[in-house]
Image: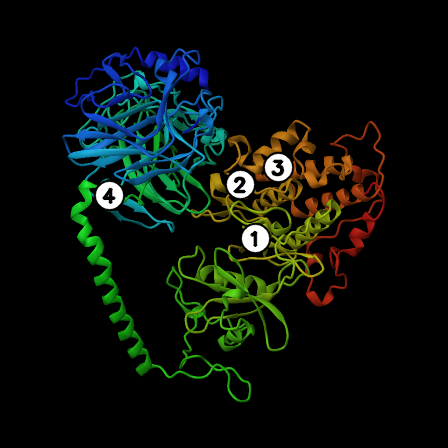
Amino acid sequence: MAGFQPLKIFSCLSIWFLFHFSTSNSYTLPDQYFINCGSPSDLAVSTQTFTGDEKSHSGYELSSSDSEAVEEPTLSAIELYQTARIFRRSSSYEFDIAQNGTYVVRFHFFPFSSLGNLYNARFNILAYGSPILSNFTVKNSNSPDFVPVQEFFLPVRVGKLRIGLVPFDVHSFAFANAIEVFLAPPDFFPDSSVAHVSGKGQKEDYNGLLRSPLHVIHRINVGGDNIMPNNDTLLRYWIPDDDYLFNKNTSRNSGIYGGKLNYQSGGATQFHAPDSVYRTAKEMNINNETRLNSFNISWRFDVQKQAKHLVRLHFCDIVTPTTNEFTKFNLYIYSNFRQDIYPYGVISQTAAPFFIDFVVDSDDSGLMLIHVGPKSGDDAPIAFLNGVEIMEVVDRFAPRGSDAKRRNLFIIIGPCVGGVVLVLIILAVFMFCLKRRKWMPLETADGRLVYLYGGSSHSRTSVKTTSGSVLADLNLGLKVPFSEILYATKIFNTKLIIGEGGFGKVCKGMLRNGTKVAVKRSEPGHRQGLLEFQTEIMVLSQIRHNNLVPLIGYCDERDEMILVYEFMENGTLRDHLYTQQGESKESAIGSKFSWDQRLRICIGAAQGLVYLHTGHSRAIIHRDIKSTNILLDKHYVAKVGDFGLSRLDQVDRTHVTTDVKGSFGYLDPEYFRCLQLTLKSDVYSFGVVLLEVLCARPAIDNSLPREQVNLSEWGMSWQIKGELDKIVDPLLLGKINPNCLRKYGETVEKCLQECGVDRPNMLDVLWDLEYCLQLQNTAVVREPYEDSTTDVSLSLPVFQRLPSASLEIVKDELNDESYGYSGGDEVFSQLKIDGAR
């Protein structure tokens, strides 16, 4: 949770402590348990009393072998945050629970500097002996995204609830300012199945939501302001959504609705979210100019990687002036899943709050994408959203203790029985295989390879597509026998694996003729499949260029999908720029390029993209340009690879798609927002790569402060200030010609324009990079009148730029092993002069 300034917290919490809680609903906030940690006395907070944990009390008990109370009364006027309890060893609070149900368990962590500085705390939180929060550290209270609360929804049974605070290691400690434990409202969560959105966008039922704790990660008041506990029915924080918008120009705040909210049976209640959430919304920023070019409103939220999250989306139609009977729009999650939102189908009134729950599988980006947008062809496009809650499903939760004793017998017996059954199944399958298949040696006496088994002539390239049409066998003369693949990779020896991507693992190998190859083999569960396999074969079989990774062949025998490329000895561009989080330093190749080398690599990659865009009768949009898809051969020549997501069409054709594909951080915001794919989408992605090369950091780095997470946004903020030199790779400090850096920054800025029509084409980008190289290697004196807008080409000798048709080149015509653009030497020979563009 993010978005609070500390001074706002202080003042608003002071109001909270004057809060008088009352409601006409049958549920009222229970008075147990509210604990004032580290204090000898109770603290009255209106109708709530936070009891001091240093004195005897009924209902709960503090068990601690090594803890101490600390106090810093001068820190703030918020009395609850003036004390804390520090735990040097594993400690716990035990609560008497008289009613089964889902409980709100809320921890307050406000660090101060007494006795060792609470900012240094590092600890785990346990419930029933099982972790619900691991390796937790508290952010600095001066940080703009600081919130002093960690909140959970916990399934609890009658008996003892034990909440443990455990230091992470012997050098650390735990602490807490306050703890709240109380029963959540009935029917707060559905007791039936919830729609489950898988990583591939599939929707299915998810059962057992209430069996696992939920950790609140985001609670967002969309279109509104901060909501503090004194204005919330369950004493919650809600924060504005502006910092999470992908593009703020696509939406506007609806304003505060002053009419009556029509709470209805089957919809939301005042406990699901306060009125303040449903009285505000974000709606589409539609005017006469944009009405025909409708777009989505998109948000991105930090989440746990590869985890399940409960996503609760709040809606209330305060946008349409009368009935919402004809109000319909689309909701997207991760661009792979779409659902119609039809308020009238849920509640037959306007201004009637309701919510929709999903359990969503996050991917490995650490971000969750949520969009709302109009229905296609809608004469009056509309879309809105009022609130978002995202809670991680803590599926690692396995309670231990008195309430779990009945399960112990099953825990012991279950694996034993399962193991026996598994062994029997394996034996049965093995015996069946021996009868049905004849094992043959891998290599015959004459050296020829044969199939491991009897083999099959089944070809993946003749399988029906999702549209139902049958694709004929590609018959491109590129087929490689599976036996040759096995020989080249030593039967896919794991020691030869050199990488893994969306298609599958990549293995180094050598064919019988001595050719070194990279073998990419599809695996179940990866994001790309048959369509990407066929696309890459079709694209690479029609093109050939010195700056594109050559496809040697493919194999589609026996349900295999294997692509064979020329081996790139020096790996990916990213390998030479930085080490990703979680990788060891040794995992990177380790060499660091000079600025001159980096420019030459960028020029080579740009040449490959120019050929894709202009050197073929049908333009090719790569759609996944990133530093890991730019590979380097033994001479460090840059080659663009991975064409599985590519599109072929006429040069000026705009592609409209409902399935956004690519790598987050490199995605064209216009493509992301409007679902329109153009050649300029590649230009944007390449602009991100150019920044990556300059700064030597990932396009997305969630470990950095929020304003630095997205490289393109962060880099452009410095470029606009004219201070791009402050974020360059430290290894390049003082080694880049200032004029070169200025031109390079201008080139990046043009590539990263929000609208595709404002970006240059790839040929222009290539020319600019060539000019940057000239500036880097020659002492170019700039006159005072030569500013960033000067068209230096005006001072060049007049010559005709060759048409795009002249760029269709085949590999055999290439004579230059360096970065030179083959077939275009007549053009680029003009660039070998000082001051050329």
Q: Tell which residue pokes out farthest to the front in this image.
A: 65
- Residue 438 or residue 470, whichever sits in front: 438
Front: mark 4 or 1: 4
| Separation of marks 4 and 1 at Cα, in angstroms | 52 Å
In terms of secondary structure, where does tag 1 sit?
loop
Query: Looking at the image, is mark 3 or mark 1 nearer the viewer?
Result: 1
Residue 188 x/y as whole percent: 22, 32
Left or right: 723 as drawn, with respect to 30:
right
Image quarter of residue 423:
bottom left
Asked if labels 1 and 3 touch by Cβ distance under 8 angstroms, the answer is no
Q: Which residue is mark 1?
A: 622
Q: Give the residue at mark 3.
A: 758
Separation of marks 4 and 2 at Cα, in angstroms: 39 Å
Quote the CA–CA distance across marks 3 and 1.
Answer: 20 Å
Left or right: 511 with respect to 383?
right
**Residue to which mark 2 is pinned:** 700
Q: Quadrant of the C terminus?
A: top right
Residue type (three-letter) at the residue carrying disc 4: Arg
- Compared to residue 798, the image places residue 617 above or below, namely below
Q: Secondary structure at mark 4?
A: loop
Identify the residue shown where x is 39% and y is 40%: 377
The answer, for residue 87, to whether it is visible in the render is yes
Which residue is found at the position 43% from the left and 16% from the top?
8
CA neighbours of label 3 inside 10 A, class few (<14), some (14 to 19), many (20+): few
Residue type at mark 3 is: Asp
- Look at discs 2 and 1 and give the one toward the viewer: 2
Q: If you read the primary sequence from the N terminus, does the residue marked by circle 3 or circle 1 appear first? A: 1
- Report which residue position mark 4 lands on: 400
Could you say where residue 635 lies in the image, as x and y percent from the top left?
A: 72, 60
Disc 2 marks a residue whose amino acid type is Ile
Q: Nearer the viewer, residue 347 or 382?
A: 347
